[in-house]
């Protein structure tokens, strides 16, 4: 991991803000019953090196999940990249977000070319030399596309492709060594993954101040899994509710408001809330 490059000057980086925010939401709402946070790894736009035969070949999934690996590289360092032949665990889920010009590579043989002009086979001009063996070897060494890598080289069990412009989600499941496109549910969760006890749906809401449709993990009933921030806010609200109920119970026994506020160490805002109780 320390020797292979983590960046490529020919790749400018994230194409837009959505490719930054959406992976964050996927990682922050991920909850796996059989795995702890220290026993799985999620990443976005990270170099994924997949074959030792061509150690400089890599793909950069928009988001991926690996299970049964430590959160930190060798349990001590943040990863600069993910090197399959060192980690020995391929991704379990990959999600790609379609961008203009990426459909063909992301969808592979499922890409619909009917709207494109079919190009004819190249014609070798008369008198030109045939392609040399060395040149052919160079052509053969061209890295495969993402779809082929995920299906054939990494054998990722669950592969998702999402187009935020059309809000279209497509799900490909590895079956018999090949991807088979799966139908989506009519309601959330759009996709249920029984092996992970996890669902994926399209949530309309606000994340990091942006209200839009977002891909988000949920349980089998379609209940959205909370981010860490939402969990903290929910815990505070629940604690506040329990405290006010306790105060209301004490007031009902005839205890004076001042005594109740001192006993429960209520804040001024909480005292005002008590004054508003019937």
Image (cartoon, rainbow, N blue to C red):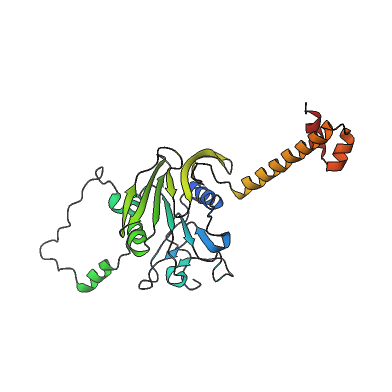
User: Percent x, y for residue 182?
Assistant: 34, 47
User: Foreground residue, 242 or 169?
Assistant: 242
User: Percent x, y for residue 153?
Assistant: 35, 64
User: Foreground residue, 276 or 98?
Assistant: 276
| Residue 88 drawn above or below residue 210 | below
- The reply to whether residue 265 is in sight is no
| Residue 175 drawn above or below residue 245 | below
User: Foreground residue, 278 or 8?
Assistant: 278
| Residue 214 drawn above or below residue 82 | above
State the residue at coordinates (35%, 44%): 183
Q: Residue furthest top?
A: 278
| Residue 129 drawn above or below residue 235 | below
State the residue at coordinates (82%, 37%): 268
State the residue at coordinates (54%, 63%): 39
Question: Is 89 positioned to the left or the right of 28 in the image?
Answer: left
State the residue at coordinates (21%, 48%): 118
- The reply to whether residue 40 is in sight is yes
User: Percent x, y for residue 187?
Assistant: 43, 38
Instruction: Quarter of the image for the C terminus: give it.
Output: top right
Question: Is 37 positioned to the left or the right of 123 in the image?
Answer: right
User: Percent x, y for residue 121?
Assistant: 17, 55
Question: Is 229 positioned to the left or the right of 64 in the image?
Answer: right
- Report the number of discs: 0
């Amino acid at each position: 991991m320390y020797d292979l490059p983590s960046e490529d000057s020919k790749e400018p980086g994230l194409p837009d803000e959505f490719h930054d925010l959406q992976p964050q939401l996927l990682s922050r709402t991920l909850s796996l019953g059989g795995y702890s946070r220290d026993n799985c790894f999620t990443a976005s736009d990270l170099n994924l090196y997949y074959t030792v035969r061509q150690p400089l070949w890599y793909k950069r999934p928009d988001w991926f999940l690996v299970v049964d690996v430590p959160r930190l590289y060798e349990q001590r360092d943040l990863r600069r990249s993910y090197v399959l032949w060192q980690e020995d665990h391929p991704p379990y889920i990959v999600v790609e977000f379609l961008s203009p010009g990426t459909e063909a590579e992301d969808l592979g043989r499922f890409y619909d070319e009917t709207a494109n002009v079919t190009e004819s086979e190249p014609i070798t001009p008369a008198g030109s030399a045939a392609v040399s063996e060395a040149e052919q070897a160079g052509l053969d060494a061209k890295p495969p596309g993402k779809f082929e890598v995920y299906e054939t080289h990494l054998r990722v069990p669950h592969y998702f492709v999402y187009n935020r412009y059309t809000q279209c989600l497509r799900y490909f499941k590895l079956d018999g060594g090949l991807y088979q496109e799966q139908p989506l549910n009519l309601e959330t969760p759009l996709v249920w993954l029984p092996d992970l006890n996890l669902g994926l749906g399209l949530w309309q809401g606000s994340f990091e101040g942006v209200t839009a449709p977002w891909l988000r993990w949920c349980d089998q009933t379609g209940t959205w899994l909370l981010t860490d921030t939402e969990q903290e806010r929910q815990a505070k609200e629940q604690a506040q509710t329990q405290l006010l109920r306790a105060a209301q119970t004490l007031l009902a026994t005839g205890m004076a408001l001042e005594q109740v506020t001192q006993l429960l160490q209520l804040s001024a805002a909480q005292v005002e809330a008590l004054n508003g109780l019937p």
